[in-house]
Image (cartoon, rainbow, N blue to C red):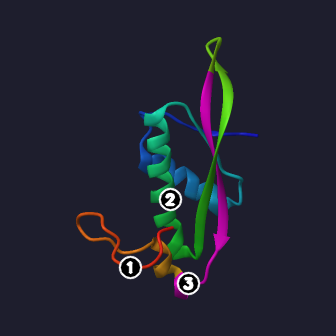
C-alpha cells in the first residue's frame, strides 16, 4: 500500500490538493504521519480537501489507525489515516460542511460530525 507522507513542515493546502486530485482520479488515499505536528498538518489538509470536494458532489471521511514503522533503524509509532469517499447530491452539498459555529467556536445547531 502506498502512503501520502505528511510531515510537520508539509503545507496543508498542498497536501489537500494532492488528496483531492487522488480522490478525483479514483486512487485510494492513505496518509502516514509521525508526530503530533505531522498529524495536525494531515488533519488540516483533510479538512481543506473536503472543502474542495464537497461542491463537486463528493464528500470524504477518514479513519485513523496506529502503526509501528522503522525510521533510521528506530521503531516509531505512525498514525495512518484512510480516506473514504462518499458521493453526495449537489443539492445537499452545502449542508455537508458541518454545523455553523459562532466566533468563539460554540456550536450553533446541528449535530457535530
Q: Is residue 75 magenta?
A: no
Residue found at the far right of this picture: 1
In this orientation, which residue lies closer to the viewer: 110 or 83? 110
Q: In the structure shown, which secondary structural element does the residue marked by tag 3 occupy?
A: helix
- Cα separation between marks 2 and 3: 17 Å
- Cα separation between marks 3 and 1: 22 Å
Along the polypeptide, which appears first: circle 3 or circle 1? 3
User: In the rendered structure, which segment of residues is drawn in magenta?
Assistant: 76-92
Judged left or right of residue 16, residue 60 is right
Task: Tell me the residue that label 3 is attached to.
Answer: 90
Q: Residues within 10 Å of mark 3 (few under 14, many from 20)?
A: few
Mark linked to residue 109: 1
Mark toward the viewer: 2 or 1: 1
- Cα separation between marks 2 and 1: 24 Å
Q: Quadrant of the N terminus?
A: top right
Rendering coords of residue 101 (x, y %): 32, 71
Are circles 2 and 3 on residues that touch, CB within 8 Å? no
In this orientation, which residue lies closer to the viewer: 36 or 11? 36
Residue found at the far top of this picture: 73
Judged left or right of residue 105, residue 56 is right
Residue plotted at (60% across, 61% down): 61
Residue found at the far left of this picture: 103
Mark linked to residue 49: 2
Q: In the structure shown, which secondary structural element does the residue marked by tag 2 occupy?
A: helix
Residue plotted at (50% across, 75% down): 96
Residue plotted at (51% across, 54% down): 46
Amino acid at each position: 500500500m502506498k502512503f501520502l507522507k505528511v510531515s510537520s513542515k508539509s503545507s496543508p493546502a498542498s497536501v489537500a490538493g494532492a488528496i483531492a486530485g487522488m480522490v478525483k482520479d479514483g486512487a485510494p488515499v492513505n496518509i502516514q504521519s509521525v508526530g503530533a505536528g505531522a498529524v495536525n498538518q494531515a488533519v488540516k489538509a483533510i479538512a481543506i480537501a473536503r472543502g474542495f470536494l464537497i461542491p463537486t458532489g463528493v464528500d470524504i471521511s477518514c479513519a485513523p489507525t496506529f502503526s509501528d514503522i522503522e525510521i533510521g533503524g528506530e521503531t516509531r509509532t505512525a498514525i495512518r489515516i484512510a480516506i473514504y469517499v462518499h458521493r453526495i447530491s449537489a443539492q445537499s452539498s452545502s449542508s455537508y460542511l458541518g454545523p455553523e459555529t459562532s466566533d468563539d467556536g460554540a456550536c450553533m445547531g446541528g449535530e457535530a460530525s
